Amino acid sequence: MISYILMCSHCAPYQFVEFGPAFIDINQVELKSATGMSLSQGIKDLWVYQDDQYLGTFPLPCRIPLSQHLDGTIKVYPGIRNYGILSRPEIYPMMIEYQQHVSLHPFDSLLLKPIFFYKSNLQPLFQEGFESGNSFSFDLDSFPASTLIRSNENFREGQYAGSGHLTQTLTEIEVSTQNIKLTDATKRVLYLELDILSDAEIQIGLGLPQNNALLKNYFLTLLPTADWKKIYIPLHELLIDVNIASFQLLVKSRLQKDVATANFYLDNLKVLSLP
C-alpha cells in the first residue's frame, strides 16, 4: 500500500491519504437467452469502459485497474475473434453489453461475472442444432454414401450434432443447406456462428445461386481442434456487395494423405441478422 503525507495550515499536522488503483476481477462470463437459442459462446476478450471512457481490451480471465476512486458505471462488451483468428478481435455486435454501477476506493477489488444476452431485435435467418433434424440435406460430393449425418456420438449442446466420417473409400464430404433468404436490410450486419470438433480440416463456404447454377465460394479453412471451438464469421463482409436474394451454407472436408480415417462434428449453427 502506498501512502503520502499531506500538510496544510488548516489540517492536522500529519494526514495520511491513500492513493492507488481499485481493481475489477473477471474470471468468466455467461450467455443467457430469452428466446431459446443455444448458449454456447466463444467470448475471448472484454472491451471495458468506465463512464464511457475506454479502459482497454482484456483477455479472459483478467484484472482491470480503475481510477483511485470510482463511483460510476462499468460497461463490459463481449469480444470475439472473427473467423477464429487471433488478429481479428472485435466487439460482438449481436450481444448487449453488461453494465453495473460500482463504488470502489483505492486498493478495493470487486469480482464480477458479466452476463450477456442476444439483442432483442436480432433476426435468426437459420438455426441448426441437429436436435430434431438435419438442414444439410444436399450431398454435393461424388460419393453418395458420404454425407453429414445427425448423430448423438459427440455434441456441444443438447443431445445431437452433425457428424461426418471420412475413410479410405469415402474420402470427401461436401454438403449444403437449402437457400437462406436475404434482403438488403438483413445482410447489413450478418454473422454465422458454429461449433466445431474435428481431427480433419473443414472448409466453410457460401453457395450463391447464379444463372440456374450454384457458384461455390469456400472462404475459410478450419484446422483440426481436439476441443469444441466456437467460430464467428462476419458474413456481411462477404455478401454486402453481392446482389443476391439467397445463399446456401457449404461444408466440405477431405481425407488427408497417409490418414486412415477422420471425423468432424458441427453443432449450434446460426445465421443471425441485425437489421
Image (tube, rainbow, N blue to C red):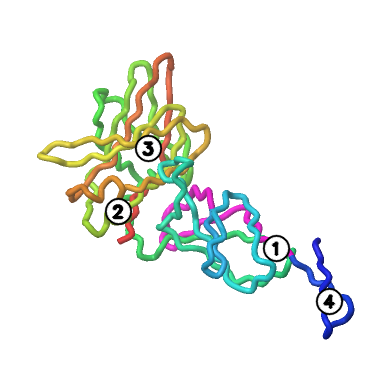
Secondary structure under tag 1 reads loop
The residue under label 4 is: 7
Q: What amino acid type is highlighted by mark number 4?
A: Met
Q: Nearer the viewer, residue 197 or 102?
A: 102
Please tell me which of labels 1 and 2 falls first in the chain.
1
Mark yes or no: residue 148 visible: yes
Q: Nearer the viewer, mark 3 or mark 2?
A: 2
For label 3, the SS is strand
Q: Assign a secondary structure to mark 2.
A: strand
Give the Cα distance between marks 1 and 4. Answer: 23 Å
Earlier sequence position, callout 3 versus callout 2: 2
Residue 37 among those drawn in magenta: yes
- Residues rendered magenta in the picture: 20-45
Q: Which residue is mark 1?
A: 21
Q: Amino acid at mark 1?
A: Pro
Report which residue position mark 2 lands on.
125
Q: Amino acid at mark 3?
A: Arg
Q: Where does label 3 land, which residue?
A: 150
